[in-house]
Image (cartoon, coloured by chain):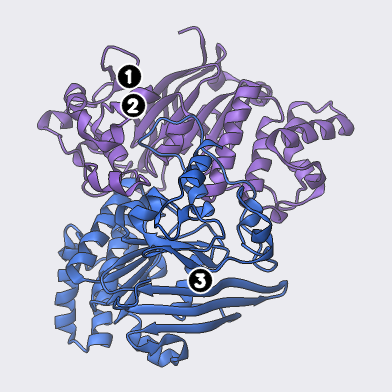
C-alpha cells in the first residue's frame, strides 16, 4: 500500500537476558515477534493486550526508542531503521510519544517552559528564546494550560495537568504521528475523560495520526479507528474497530472483551463470560504453535503444530491468527460485549 | 437506612483527619455507614475521596499524624477504643483486609505454607500440622492450581494473580465475618481480574462473609456489589442498591461519573468529562463539596452543605436538588432528561 504514512513490516524486538551461569546460554525474551501493519494518515490505531504482551515495546520500537532486532519501519517511504543517528534526530520531530505516568515522565528540576520547549531545542536549535517561548505558549493553549503556569515546576501540578504538559511537549514540534502509551491509565476517571477528549480534539485540529496503546478496551474503543490485539508479542487480531468489537474473530479477543467490566448491573449479570484459565505463559519460553492455546477454550492438537498466520476473515481488512476464526465468528453473537 | 437490618459493622459520625505542615487534612468527615452480614458493599470514589482512609482507620492502619473521631462498632465493640493488642485479636480473625498490591501482605522471605498456617495457629490455636492441612485446603478452594507444590514456594515465585489468590486465602482462613478489599484487582489484567472477582463472589456466598470493596472502577462495582456508597471529598454523597444507583443516580456527581466513563459494549463518539478536579481537603469548598464542578449548582449549594438524607426507600443522597422525587420515590424525569441532553 503506497498511501501508508507508516508501514511496520515483520518487526521483532528481542531482549537478551542475563545468563544464569557463565556457561549457560543467555535466555532470550521475544517481546515483539513479527508484527506488521500499515497506518494511514489521520488514522488512530489502538493496540491492546495484557501486561507483558509487548505493546509498549512495540510502540517504542516503532520510534526506535528501543532498537528493534529485525524487520522494517517505513515512515513516509523512508526506512527509519536505516537512518543514521543524525538523520533520525531530524525525523524525530515528526514522531512523538506520550507516556503513562504524567508526573514521573517530567523532569522535576525543569520548569514547564523548559519541559515543553525541550523537543524544540533539539529539532530546531536555531530558534531564538523568544520564538521558542511563544511556541511553548501556543502549545500550552492547545492543551488547555493557563499561560501563567509557564514558570512552574512539575510537582505543583495534579496528574491531569501534568499529562497536559506531557501532551504539550509531544505536540510542540508539530509532529505527524504520536504514540500514546497508556496516556490515561494513571488518571482518575473524571480526569480521564478530559484527557481523552483533549487528544481527540487535537487529532482533529492538528491532523494527527495516533497509535493508542492501552490495556483498557473501553478507552480504546472510544478513540480508535482500527484495533490491533497483541498476545505474547504477536498480533492475534487486527481490523476496523466496529468489526473487532462487534465480531471478534480470535478466542483471545473474545475472552478479553467478555472479561472487561461493564458499568451496568443488568448487563454485568446477564452477559456470558468466557473464562480463561491461568496466567499468560512466559515470553521467554512461549508454547509451540499458537501461543494462546494453553489458555484457549477451543484449542485442538493442531494448534500446537505451527504459529497460525493472520488470515482475512469475512473477506475484508479484518484478520485473525486463529485456525478456527470462522468458527469463533459464528459463535460470536452470544457475548454481551458484542452489542453495538 | 432500614433500622431493622442486622448490622455487622457500623460507622457513626466517623471522621479521619491528618495533621500536616500545611494544615489539617480532613480526609473523612462525619461518615455514617452500616454493613450487614453477608452483603457486598462497594465504596466508590476518586483518589483523595477518603475511601481507603475510611477503612484504614477501621483497621487501625492510619499514619501517626492521623486523628479519628466518631464510633466504629464491629460485633458490638467500638474498635476505636480498643488497644492495639485487643485490635490484633479482631484483625485477621473476625475481619481481614486485602490490598491492591499482594506483596504488602506477604512476607517475601517466608514460604506460602508458613504464612498461611501462622494465621491459624495464632488466631485459632491450631496445631502446626492441622493448620498446614487447612492452609492447603484453602489454597485449593481459591483455585490455585498445583497447590501442593505452590504451598512450598515463596511469594516471588508466583504470578500477580496467584499472589492475590494467596492473600485472599489468607484473609479467608479464619472465616472472618468481614473482608475489606482495597482495589484488589486494579493491578491485575482484565482476564485475571475477572477470575478474582468470580472468586470473591463465590467465597462471600459460601462463607457468608460480608465484603467491602473499595474501588474507583464502576464496571467492577456493577458486577459484584449489592449496595454502593459513592464518596467525594471525604463524605458519602450517595448510597443505595446497585441497580437503583446505576439506573437512576440521584446525586449529580454520581450521574456525571457514569457519563464520563467509556463503555466497552457501546459505540460512542465522546465521553463527557467532569470539569475541574477534586477539591483540596485542607481548604474544602463551602457548602456542597461538589458545587464548583456541578452544573446544577445554585446559590444554596454554595452556602449550605446538604446532609446525607433519604431520597427514597433505601436510598440516601447528599444533594439539595437530587434527581429523585423523595416523596414519590420515582425518578425526577425533568432533571434526568436535562442531564442527558446537555
Which chain is home to disc 2?
Answer: A
Q: Residue A318 location, x and y as percent?
A: 33, 19
Residue B312 sits above or below residue B336 on the image: below
Q: Secondary structure at mark 3?
A: helix
Between label 3 and label 1, give the one nearer the viewer. Answer: 3
Which residue of the protein is positioned furthest toward the front in this rendering? B328
Which chain is home to disc 1?
Answer: A
Q: Secondary structure at mark 1?
A: loop
> Mark 1 highlights which residue?
A318
> Mark 3 highlights which residue?
B53
Kindly tell me whether residue B106 is visible in this rendering.
no
Chain letter for the part of the structure drawn in purple? A
Count of number-bearing discs: 3
Tell whether label 2 touches label 1 (CB within 8 Å): yes
Determine whether, in the image, residue B102 is placed left or right of residue B286: left
Mark sitting earlier along the chain (1/2): 2
Residue B310 sits above or below residue B32 on the image: above
Q: Residue B162 location, x and y as percent?
A: 28, 58
The residues tagged by marks 3 and 1 sit, at their Cα atoms, a distance apart of 47 Å
> Mark 2 highlights which residue?
A244
Are the residues flagged by discs 3 and 1 from a single subunit?
no
Chain letter for the part of the structure drawn in blue? B
Q: Residues within 10 Å of mark 3 (few under 14, many from 20)?
A: many
Which residue is nearer to you in this view: B278 or B200? B278
Q: Quadrant of the N terminus of chain A?
A: top left
Determine whether, in the image, residue A235 is placed left or right of residue A301: right
Which chain is home to disc 3?
Answer: B
Residue at x 40%, y 21% (from the top left corner): A36
Q: Secondary structure at mark 2?
A: helix
The residues tagged by marks 1 and 2 sit, at their Cα atoms, a distance apart of 7 Å
Q: Residues within 10 Å of mark 1 (few under 14, many from 20)?
A: many
Amino acid at each position: 500500500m503506497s498511501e501508508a504514512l507508516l508501514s511496520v513490516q515483520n518487526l521483532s524486538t528481542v531482549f537478551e537476558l542475563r545468563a544464569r551461569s557463565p556457561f549457560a546460554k543467555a535466555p532470550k525474551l521475544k517481546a515483539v515477534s513479527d508484527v506488521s501493519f500499515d497506518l494511514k494518515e489521520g488514522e488512530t490505531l489502538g493496540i491492546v493486550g495484557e501486561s507483558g504482551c509487548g505493546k509498549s515495546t512495540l510502540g517504542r520500537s516503532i520510534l526506535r526508542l528501543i532498537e528493534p532486532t529485525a524487520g522494517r519501519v517505513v515512515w513516509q517511504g523512508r526506512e527509519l531503521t536505516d537512518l543514521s543517528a543524525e538523520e533520525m534526530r531530524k525525523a524525530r520531530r515528526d514522531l512523538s510519544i506520550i507516556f503513562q505516568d504524567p508526573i514521573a515522565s517530567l523532569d522535576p528540576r525543569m520548569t514547564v517552559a523548559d519541559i515543553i520547549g525541550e523537543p524544540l531545542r533539539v529539532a530546531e536549535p536555531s530558534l531564538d528564546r523568544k520564538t521558542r517561548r511563544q511556541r511553548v505558549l501556543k502549545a500550552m493553549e492547545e492543551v488547555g494550560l493557563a499561560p501563567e503556569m509557564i514558570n512552574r515546576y512539575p510537582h505543583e501540578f495534579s496528574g491531569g495537568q501534568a499529562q497536559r504538559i506531557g501532551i504539550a511537549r509531544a505536540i510542540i514540534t508539530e509532529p505527524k504521528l504520536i504514540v500514546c502509551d497508556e496516556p490515561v491509565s494513571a488518571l482518575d476517571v473524571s480526569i480521564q475523560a478530559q484527557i481523552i477528549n483533549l487528544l481527540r480534539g487535537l487529532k482533529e485540529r492538528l491532523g494527527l495520526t495516533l497509535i493508542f496503546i492501552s490495556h483498557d478496551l473501553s478507552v480504546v474503543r472510544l478513540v480508535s479507528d482500527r484495533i490491533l490485539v497483541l498476545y505474547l508479542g504477536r498480533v492475534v487480531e487486527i481490523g476496523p474497530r466496529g468489526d473487532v468489537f462487534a465480531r471478534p474473530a480470535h478466542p483471545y479477543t473474545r475472552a478479553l472483551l467478555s472479561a472487561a467490566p461493564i458499568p451496568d448491573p443488568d448487563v454485568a449479570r446477564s452477559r456470558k463470560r468466557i473464562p480463561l484459565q491461568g496466567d499468560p505463559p512466559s515470553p521467554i519460553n512461549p508454547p509451540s504453535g499458537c501461543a494462546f492455546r494453553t489458555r484457549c477454550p477451543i484449542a485442538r492438537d493442531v494448534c500446537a503444530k505451527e504459529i497460525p498466520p493472520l488470515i482475512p476473515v469475512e473477506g475484508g481488512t479484518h484478520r485473525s491468527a486463529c485456525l478456527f476464526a470462522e468458527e469463533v465468528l459464528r459463535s460470536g453473537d452470544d457475548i454481551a460485549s458484542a452489542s453495538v | 437506612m432500614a433500622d431493622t437490618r442486622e448490622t455487622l459493622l457500623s460507622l457513626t459520625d466517623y471522621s479521619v483527619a491528618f495533621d500536616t505542615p500545611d494544615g489539617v487534612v480532613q480526609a473523612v468527615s462525619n461518615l455514617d455507614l452500616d454493613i450487614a452480614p453477608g452483603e457486598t458493599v462497594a465504596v466508590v470514589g476518586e483518589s483523595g475521596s477518603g475511601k481507603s482512609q475510611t477503612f484504614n482507620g477501621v483497621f487501625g492502619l492510619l499514619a501517626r499524624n492521623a486523628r479519628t473521631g466518631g464510633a466504629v462498632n464491629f460485633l458490638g465493640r467500638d474498635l476505636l477504643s480498643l488497644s492495639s493488642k485487643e485490635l490484633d485479636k479482631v484483625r485477621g480473625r473476625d475481619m481481614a483486609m486485602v490490598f491492591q498490591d499482594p506483596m504488602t501482605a506477604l512476607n517475601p522471605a517466608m514460604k506460602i505454607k508458613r504464612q498461611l498456617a501462622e494465621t491459624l495457629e495464632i488466631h485459632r490455636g491450631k496445631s502446626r500440622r492441622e493448620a498446614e492441612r487447612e492452609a492447603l485446603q484453602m489454597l485449593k478452594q481459591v483455585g490455585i492450581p498445583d497447590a501442593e507444590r505452590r504451598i512450598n514456594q515463596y511469594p516471588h515465585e508466583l504470578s500477580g494473580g496467584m499472589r492475590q489468590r494467596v492473600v485472599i486465602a489468607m484473609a479467608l482462613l479464619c472465616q472472618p465475618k468481614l473482608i475489606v478489599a482495597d482495589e484488589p484487582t486494579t493491578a491485575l489484567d482484565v482476564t485475571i481480574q475477572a477470575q478474582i472477582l468470580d472468586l470473591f463472589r463465590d467465597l462471600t456466598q459460601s462463607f457468608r462473609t460480608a465484603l467491602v470493596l473499595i474501588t474507583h472502577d464502576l464496571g467492577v462495582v456493577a458486577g459484584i456489589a449489592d449496595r454502593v456508597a459513592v464518596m467525594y471529598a471525604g463524605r458519602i454523597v450517595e448510597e443505595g442498591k446497585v441497580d437503583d444507583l446505576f439506573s437512576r443516580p440521584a446525586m449529580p456527581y454520581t450521574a456525571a461519573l457514569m457519563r464520563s466513563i467509556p463503555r466497552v459494549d457501546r459505540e460512542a463518539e465522546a465521553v463527557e468529562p467532569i470539569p475541574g478536579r477534586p477539591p483540596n481537603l485542607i481548604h474544602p469548598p463551602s457548602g456542597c463539596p461538589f458545587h464548583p464542578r456541578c452544573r446544577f449548582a445554585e446559590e444554596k449549594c454554595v452556602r449550605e452543605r446538604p446532609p446525607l438524607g433519604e431520597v427514597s426507600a433505601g436510598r440516601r443522597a447528599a444533594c439539595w436538588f437530587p434527581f429523585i422525587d423523595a416523596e414519590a420515590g420515582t425518578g425526577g424525569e425533568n432533571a434526568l432528561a436535562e442531564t442527558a441532553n446537555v
